[in-house]
Structure formats: structure tokens, C-alpha cells
Amino acid sequence: MVSKRIDVLNIKQLLRLYAQGVSKLQISKQLGISRNTAKKYT
């Protein structure tokens, strides 16, 4: 499986959402990334 790169703006948004208490599942849906990717960066 080819991994898709996540850009810096998505990482910043991911971290901001996570700091606000948003679940990894919700973050992944909002940003269009997998839950495992969200988990990797938190």
C-alpha cells in the first residue's frame, strides 16, 4: 500500500483539534485521513 503524505497544515490542524479534545475518529473524518494516521501524529 502506498502511503499518502500529510502536509504541515493538516498536521497543525490535527494537533489543534486533538488539543481541543476531539476524538481521533472525528479528526480523521474531518481531515480525510485514516484513524491510524491521526493516531500516529497525536
Image (cartoon, rainbow, N blue to C red):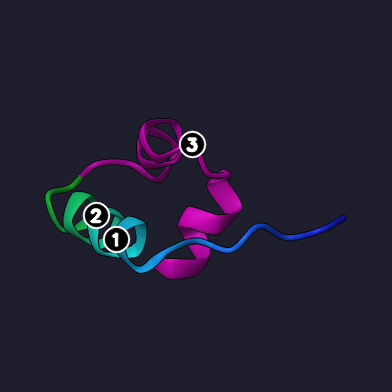
Magenta part of the chain: 22-42
Q: Which quadrant would the C terminus be assigned to in this image?
A: bottom left
**Where is residue 24 drawn, in percent x and y?**
40, 45
- The label number, if any, that marks residue 13 in the structure image: 2
- Farthest residue in the left direction? 20
Residue at mark 3 to residue at mark 2: CA–CA distance:
12 Å
Type of the residue with mark 2: Gln
Q: Secondary structure at mark 2?
A: helix
Q: Residues within 10 Å of mark 3 (few under 14, many from 20)?
A: few
Residue at mark 2 to residue at mark 1: CA–CA distance:
6 Å
Q: Nearer the viewer, mark 1 or mark 3?
A: 1
- Farthest residue in the right direction? 1
| Residue placed under numbered mark 3 in the picture | 32
Residue at mark 1 to residue at mark 3: CA–CA distance:
13 Å
Q: Nearer the viewer, mark 2 or mark 1?
A: 1
30 vs 19, left or right, is right
Q: Are marks 2 and 1 in contact (CB under 8 Å)?
A: yes
Front residue of 25/16: it is: 16
Task: Identify the main secondary structure in magenta.
Answer: helix
**Where is residue 37 drawn, in percent x and y?**
55, 57
| Residue placed under numbered mark 1 in the picture | 9
Which quadrant of the structure image shows residue 19?
bottom left
